[in-house]
Amino acid sequence: VMYLKFLDKDQREVQLTYKANTDNPTGNHVLAIPVYQGKLLFTRHKNRGIEFPGGKREHGESSIDAIQRELYEETGAYIEEIQYIAQYTVKTNDASRFVKDVYFIQVSSLANRTDYLETDGPCLFTSIEDIPYSERSFLLQDDAILHCFERVISLGLY
């Protein structure tokens, strides 16, 4: 098993483990790195800016169900193919556990939604660097997420 340990911007310990698609996702948060028509699919969060879609797993929901729901709510995306690629844990300062499952997702189509909840819907870019720095969410500067994106590239998925 390949894993990395590092400190995040708030000096909290992060452990990132690369996963196989056969591994069991157990996170309480989910993140998608989706690709649609050869481009990266992001969502534009109303407060934070442009970021990969994701969120919290709801009570009684599986990790896979959560990522499907979050991706659809925030971008209108329908999933063609999904691959579990990583999980990371952030040591929080209280007793709560922050564990995020990360998925690579091939999107088949986008529904035209009138409401994308806390986001302004989908946006497509060829790379993170193409997003104006001032419009990037802090999540696109998060080492764990950037390592996951590098993993997608190293696996030949994008």
Image (cartoon, rainbow, N blue to C red):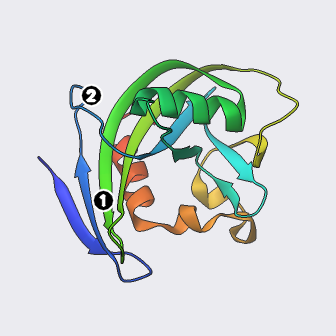
Residue neighbourhood size for the residue with mark 1, other residues' Cα within 10 Å, grouped as few (<14), some (14–19), many (≥20): many
Looking at the rendered structure, the secondary structure element under dot 2 is loop
Foreground mark, 1 or 2, reads 1
Looking at the rendered structure, the secondary structure element under dot 1 is strand
Task: Say whether disc 1 or disc 2 marks the residue closer to the N-terminus.
Answer: 2
Q: Where is residue 65? Give x, y as percent.
A: 48, 26
Residue 117, quarter of the rendered image: top right
Q: Which residue is mark 2?
A: 21
Side of 76 where 19 appears, left or right = left
The amino acid pointed to by label 2 is Asn
Residue 91, quarter of the rendered image: bottom left
The reply to whether residue 39 is visible in this rendering is no
Q: Which residue is mark 1?
A: 89
Q: Residue at x 56, y 62 (%)?
A: 140
Residue neighbourhood size for the residue with mark 2, other residues' Cα within 10 Å, grouped as few (<14), some (14–19), many (≥20): few
Q: Is residue 130 above or below residue 122?
A: below
Q: Residue at x 43, y 30 (%)?
A: 60
Q: Residue at x 46, y 19 (%)?
A: 81
Q: Looking at the image, do the residues carrying marks 1 and 2 touch, with CB atoms under 8 Å apart?
A: no
Q: Is residue 158 above or below residue 82?
A: below
Q: Where is residue 157? Give x, y as percent.
A: 40, 33
Q: Where is residue 62? Give x, y as percent.
A: 40, 29
Marks 1/2: CA distance? 18 Å
